[in-house]
Amino acid sequence: GDSVTQMEGPVTLSEEAFLTINCTYTATGYPSLFWYVQYPGEGLQLLLKATKADDKGSNKGFEATYRKETTSFHLEKGSVQVSDSAVYFCALINNNDMRFGAGTRLTVKP
Amino acid sequence: DAGVIQSPRHEVTEMGQEVTLRCKPISGHDYLFWYRQTMMRGLELLIYFNNNVPIDDSGMPEDRFSAKMPNASFSTLKIQPSEPRDSAVYFCASSPNYNEQFFGPGTRLTVL
């Protein structure tokens, strides 16, 4: 079946560092891809999405590009802030079947 | 809109007791999802509804779990009898089209 694999955390960065969280997927056909963020004590929030190959999703300085050739959707941000500390989930939807990755905890230190 | 509303936010109960979790989706959303989150197993989809009809309950762990959606604005997830291994955070989410899901704040369940 379809699946999503994320880099294991936790990830700890200093403020203003560059962030990459790797995500790869396995799916038949053409899934839609998502990044969700979960702040402490809250539910997941959609961060960005891409619905077809080569699409770039972006929001709040975060970006991810749908790469079909490498089946990847890596999350990047050029300069992280303390307020970006959260758990990030990569996810896909394919034929109304949604799969989440295990989540990557990011801690940004001042 | 107030977003997805879940109650209670925290629930502590003893093994063997019945637990009922409640969810009010965003008005106009046709899909409703119940998830369970634990450190060991991550985020698991338990069941989802479309237009109040259960579509996929393959994630419901066992017969002790049941979910209902009597109308478009209310859903419940019931565990009877509860066990310590049911301790988790339970999330409800709703969506207008399945693709973009809006999550509630979750209910943290502790079964002693």
Image (tube, coloured by chain):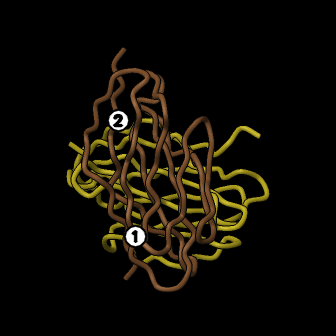
Q: Is residue B101 visible?
A: no
SS at circle 1: strand
Q: Residues within 10 Å of mark 1 (few under 14, many from 20)?
A: many
At x 47%, y 60%, the residue is A73
Report the quarter where the C terminus of chain B lies.
top left
SS at circle 2: strand
* Chain with brown colouring: A
- Circle 1 chain: A
Q: Which residue position holds label 2?
A: A106
Q: Name the spot of residue A65 as percent of width and height, x first.
A: 54, 58
Between A48 and B109, the residue placed more toward the observer is: A48
Q: Which mark is residue A64?
A: none
Picture layout, residue B56 above or below residue B96: below
At x 63%, y 63%, the residue is A55
Q: Name the spot of residue A7 as percent of width and height, x first.
A: 29, 53
Q: What kind of residue is marked 2?
A: Leu
Q: Which mark is residue A25?
A: 1
Asked if badge 1 and badge 2 are on a common chain, one would say yes
Please give left or right for residue B96 compared with residue B101 in the image.
right
Report the quarter where the N terminus of chain B lies.
top right
Mark 1 near mark 2, Cβ–Cβ under 8 Å? no
Please give left or right for residue A12 compared with residue B93 in the image.
left
Between A36 and B81, the residue placed more toward the observer is: A36
Q: What kind of residue is marked 1?
A: Tyr
- Circle 2 chain: A
Between B22 and A39, the residue placed more toward the observer is: A39
Q: Is residue A76 visible?
A: yes
At x 68%, y 42%, the residue is B3
At x 32%, y 38%, the residue is B12
* Chain with yellow colouring: B
Q: Name the spot of residue B68 as percent of width and height, x first.
A: 56, 67
Q: Residues within 10 Å of mark 2 (few under 14, many from 20)?
A: many
